[in-house]
Image (tube, rainbow, N blue to C red):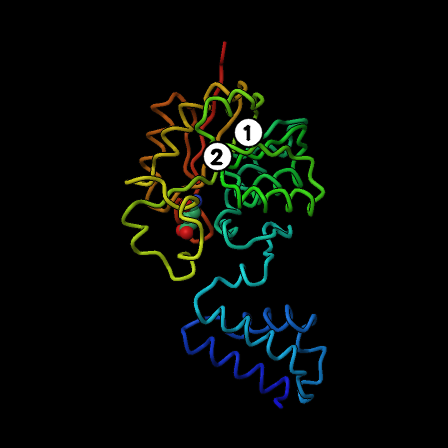
Amino acid sequence: MVTLNELFQSAKASLSEIGIENAYFETKELFCKTFGKEPVYFDMSDYADEKNRKAFESLIKRRVKGEPLQYILGEWEFYSLPIKVGKGVLIPRQDTETLVDAAIELYKNNCGITVLDLCSGSGCIGLALEKNLAVKKIVLVENSKSAVDYLKENVTLNSSKAEIVKGSVLDNAVIDRLPQADLIVSNPPYLSSSDMENLQREVEFEPKDALFGGEDGLDFYREIAGLYINKLNSGGRVFFEIGIDQGVEVSRILTDAGYKNVRIIKDMCGADRVATGEVYDRA
Ligand code: GLN
């Protein structure tokens, strides 16, 4: 028999040992997932019952093997919204809140806008925009079967009115089905071949098709910029999440495709994170 405290401390030590920085926080989250409440609500000198002990230890074992905490928890917060995640869908990152902030800042005074979220994944960007802007219509486009399953769950969980379109954002038949939009947002796969060779251990568990953007990582920007410029209403904008070293190239891609007012927006760490461009004066 072990006490809850002994169980907690030994789990935390296992996570620290493999170099997890915030071992206390992660242990607490996994404890909470198993026992239903945070340690503060328990007398930690009580003995753990065997069933819970085994369940907790098996979650810790998964984490020790490198599986991301978010997948083990099954849910993660993005822009204050609960987002279901697991194998087969990209985990929402805090970096991506930069894109949401920028789009909200520019569209907060607009009413009844139509939004397209391309390569939607878990749906985190589109759902955050729908919650914070006066959206009339929003369409979430995603190609991967497993990501679409999470997307459906997240639409329901967040009482969203978003429409889901399953298909490739590069497929003309898909594009034809989409409405004209005021705002297009996308966090497409943007890692290059060399980035893919140096993935963090946790990222190895995430779907490659949500990460790999072709040899130089820029395939989706080149394609989407051209294919979607006519989907934007006059005054409409595209917002792309970009990798920290892609600002110059993605700006050029947007400018060459005919977008105006192309800008790069930095994240909280001061790194290039979002590229945006506008369409106007369409006859
Ligand atoms: N930001 C992600 C990472 O570095 C990549 C996400 C993407 O390719 N869209 O793991």
Residue furthest out toward the top: 283
* 13 or 58: nearer the viewer: 58
Give the quadrant of residue 17: bottom left
Q: Which amino acid does label 2 sit on?
A: Phe
- 234 is higher (above) or lower (below) than 163: above
Q: Crowdedness of circle 2 by 10 Å Cα count: few (<14), some, many (20+)?
A: many
- The quarter in which the N terminus is drawn is bottom right
Q: Crowdedness of circle 1 by 10 Å Cα count: few (<14), some, many (20+)?
A: many
Q: What residue type is labelled 1?
A: Leu
Residue at (58, 51) in percent of width and height? 78
How far is mark 2 from mark 1, CA to CA?
A: 8 Å
Q: Position of residue 103 (x, y in %)?
A: 55, 36
Give the quadrant of residue 130: top right
**81 displayed left or right of 118:** right
Residue at (52, 50) in percent of width and height? 92
| Secondary structure found at label 2 | strand
**268 displayed left or right of 85:** left
Q: Residue 183 carries which label?
A: 1
- 208 is higher (above) or lower (below) than 219: below
* 190 or 252: nearer the viewer: 190
Q: Do the residues labelled 2 and 1 touch (CB within 8 Å)?
A: yes
Q: Name the residue under label 2.
A: 239
Residue at (52, 22) in percent of width and height? 232
Q: Position of residue 105 (x, y in %)?
A: 57, 38
**111 displayed left or right of 217:** right
Q: Earlier in the sequence, mark 2 or mark 1?
A: 1
